[in-house]
Amino acid sequence: MPSDRLFVAGLCLTASLPALADTSANLSPDLPVVTVTATRTATPLEKAAPNISVIGQDTLSATTGGHLEDLFRYEPGVSVNNDPTRRGNGDLVIRGMSGNRILTQVDGVRMPDVYSANKAAISGRDLVEPWHLEQVEIARGPISSLFGANAMGGLVRFETLSPEGVIGVEKPVAGLVRGAFGDGSDATAGHARLAVGGERWAALFAHTQRREHEADNFGTDDSQGSTASAARTRPNPATIRTDSTLAKLQFKPAAGHRVELTLDQYHRRNDTEVHTSRSATVNDFDADDSNRRDRVSLGYRYVSPDADSGLTGASAQLYHQTLDNHEKTRENRSGNTVTRFDDNRFAQRLSGFDGQLEWRHAFGDVSHKILAGLELSRTDTERLRDRLQVNKLTGATTKVVAGETYPQKSFPDTQTQAVGAFVQDEIGLGRRWTLIPGLRWDGYRMTPQPDALSRANQNRAPEPGKLSDSAFSPRLATSFKTDDHWTLFASAGMGFRMPPFDAVTNAFINPMFGYELRPNANLEPERSTGIELGAKAGYASFDLALNLFATRYRNFIDNVQLAGATPSLPGVPQVFQAQNLDKVETRGVELNGAWRFAPGFTLRNALSIARGDVSSADRPLDSIAPPTLVTGLRYDYRNVSIEPVWTLVAKKKRVSNDAYFKAPGYGRLDLLARWQVNKHVTTRLNLSNVTDQKHWNWADVAQRNNGATIDLYSAARRAAAVSVDVAF
């Protein structure tokens, strides 16, 4: 049956069943799923708007690979792109928005910025260890009224393991040892965690090591010589090593008060033979890429024993986070007579404070839950590039290569200071109505700090200037409980994103290749306005969540060639600059839920259909994924569970350029199985792409030409992975 007909058949099945939702967030079947993303306070997921979803321990524990792609595989509308040529996973995409238009946090601390050069993700979002997470929360659509800049397209919030989450309530000491192997890349992984707790003190330590190679795909061309860049479709050979550590120390000085010190480290190293960079002039290309993220934070939390009135909660956090991405390459050129050694670095340092207070008051049938908070942060960013070229015949060396002088900086060191203040009132009007108005103000200042290295190739390009601006982000949400089962939701909110540092500060001229990059300190923030309409139903036998959305984005920032611009340096005809250009509109429907139709059986489905247009240019938004339906039939019997999961994706039909590849539709079958041998030992088996269906994930091929090497970006082939947990 053709893939489009398979997708239509799946839609018919969805329409005929009260289907759809990921209920895996429970740490145990008896605990309610709680999210803090919906209102920035602990809220049961069943009461949160349907654009909020949670990935919990059941899914996280079953993820044998260390890739974000595995976490979001069963979240339609959310995807992670993958680079088979060198670095692997790069970026999150939600409803077609990606990069720094999606805010990503770990324990409430913003992750380092996404940074790309020549469409390659130098710094991505794949700096988190899935086995160190307690749950993942996703907000689709603008949510800047609570979380500020960069949440204009959505939010992904990673919550790390906690001592109480590991220990539970029955014993003072608990731990787990996990081993896994397989997953199509010869991967092996080992994990250990230990938590201890008492009346006032608690601690947690977790460590994970992973070793793997490149994943297998459907490419067949293994070219390694001068034609590799134009013909190779097999992934480049790679050896990947990851080490992650999480440590927490908690102290409870009094009832309701908790102080927590956290250390979070992630380090990945990729050694890659980059055959796809070989050509008639490049004889060999090897890369050694290292990514390291370190975070230390000190947090305080207060929960009042009297949760009915007055000050009922408070929290504060001081944090410092560093990112160091180091790229080393060795390149043999010109008939193996010249060797280039590159040593590049992208680094960020983030320090900040955030705090919030929560009050509750009631006046008759009207209740108020008021939230107010403040955030302060400082981010220092630098991009250092160095290159040495050696003539192997004469031994001569030079640091002036291809018209550029090294060492240099792609842009001046840049310091960004940001402050945000927000207030929200969750108003209960009787037992059925809830009204939530919220407002946030954000201000920022971006200050470039030019030096000799940033001016090395600036030549006569204009000096970058300072940029400062501010924005208000209002939001109004409401819900109405029609009866004991159904709740209706509606919300309207705004989001924004400050201009990226490199767009503001990049000042660069390359006379040999004839182009100039100009800074632009007059950029305006990107802004978004979104409307969400939804409904949720909860019955003994099924749950249902429906969400309709429409979002408008304006002032999109993109690099454009300035027609008729006077070059800063004679003989440089092409002048580029980042400018506010496009207006974008997205709209769609999301549906998810679960039907417990017989003892032990649960049918879970999730559907996402979206459309996006660059309205200012009258063309489709290429990053929008095609309609996707995920269906899982889970059977639980005593200590065994098994779930076949079928992913149906429609053919991609709308692209902005006829030369772009239109990925065909497909149906992919995965099989998840779990056996709890006894109270200490649990085994899992994951079979992915059981039928070995050739397909492409849209996030990997968006805006790629339909050429001879498109199979290089095909998805992974059939694979199996096994893991064993030993808990004590």
Image (tube, rainbow, N blue to C red):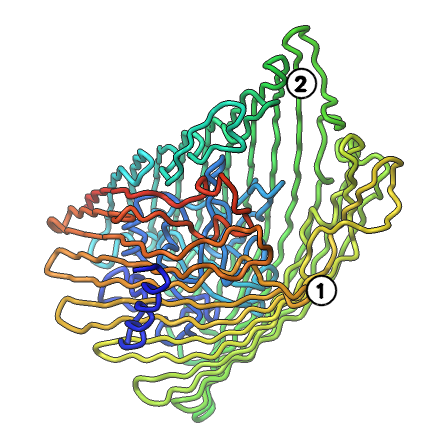
Seen as rendered, the residue at the extreme top is 394
The residue labelled by disc 2 is 389
338 or 65, nearer to the observer:
338
- Secondary structure under tag 2 reads strand
Q: Is residue 112 left or right of residue 257?
A: right
Q: Residue at x 66, y 39 (%)?
A: 382
- Dot 2 amino acid type: Gln
> Could you tell me residue 458's position as x and y percent?
80, 36
* Mark toward the start of the polypeptide (2 vs 1): 2
> Could you tell me residue 383's position as x and y percent?
66, 37
315 or 34, nearer to the observer:
34
The residue labelled by disc 1 is 470
Q: Is residue 380 visible?
A: yes
Q: What distance separates the C-alpha of mark 2 from that of mark 1? A: 45 Å
- Dot 1 amino acid type: Ser
Q: How many marks?
A: 2
Q: Is residue 363 above or below residue 173?
A: below
Q: Residue at x 82, y 51 (%)?
A: 563
